[in-house]
């Protein structure tokens, strides 16, 4: 399942981070690594971007970036 498919209020665990180059490195630097738990706080009114809570801080990702991240619901 992709991170972009998780609904508001749900938790998920990161399984794989796709993408390449700078995007992948940037996602890792934000704390989205294999095994990390994320909470989908909310989506913007037009569903882009989405707000996540990762390791206690809030993070916004575009839906196209979230679609590169494979997760499993918790």
Image: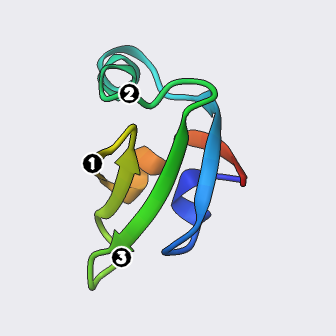
| Callouts 1 and 3 close, C-beta under 8 Å | no
| Callouts 3 and 2 close, C-beta under 8 Å | no
The numbered mark, 3 or 2, whose residue comes first in the sequence reads: 2
In 3D space, how far apart are the residues under numbered discs 1 and 3 (Cα atoms)? 15 Å
The answer to whether 54 appears left or right of 48 in the picture is right
Residue depicted at x 37% and y 55%: 52
Circle on res. 59: 1
Closest to the camera, between mark 1 and mark 3, is: 1
Residue depicted at x 35% and y 74%: 43
Circle on res. 31: 2
Query: Few, some or many C-alpha atoms within 10 Å of disc 2 (few <14, some 14-19, many ≥20)?
Result: some
Q: Secondary structure at mark 3?
A: loop
Q: Residue furthest bottom?
A: 45
For disc 3, the marked residue is 47
Residue depicted at x 63% and y 28%: 35
Give the image location of residue 36, x and y in percent: 55, 33
Q: Can residue 69 be seen?
A: yes
The answer to whether 35 appears left or right of 4 in the picture is right
Q: Is residue 25 above or below residue 43?
A: above
| Callouts 2 and 1 close, C-beta under 8 Å | yes
């Amino acid at each position: 399942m992709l991170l972009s498919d998780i609904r508001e209020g749900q938790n998920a665990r990161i399984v794989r981070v796709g993408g390449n180059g700078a995007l992948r490195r940037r996602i890792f630097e934000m704390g989205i690594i294999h095994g990390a738990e994320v909470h989908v706080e909310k989506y913007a009114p037009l569903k882009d971007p989405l707000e996540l809570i990762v390791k206690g801080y809030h993070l916004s990702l575009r839906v196209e970036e979230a679609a590169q991240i494979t997760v499993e619901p918790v």
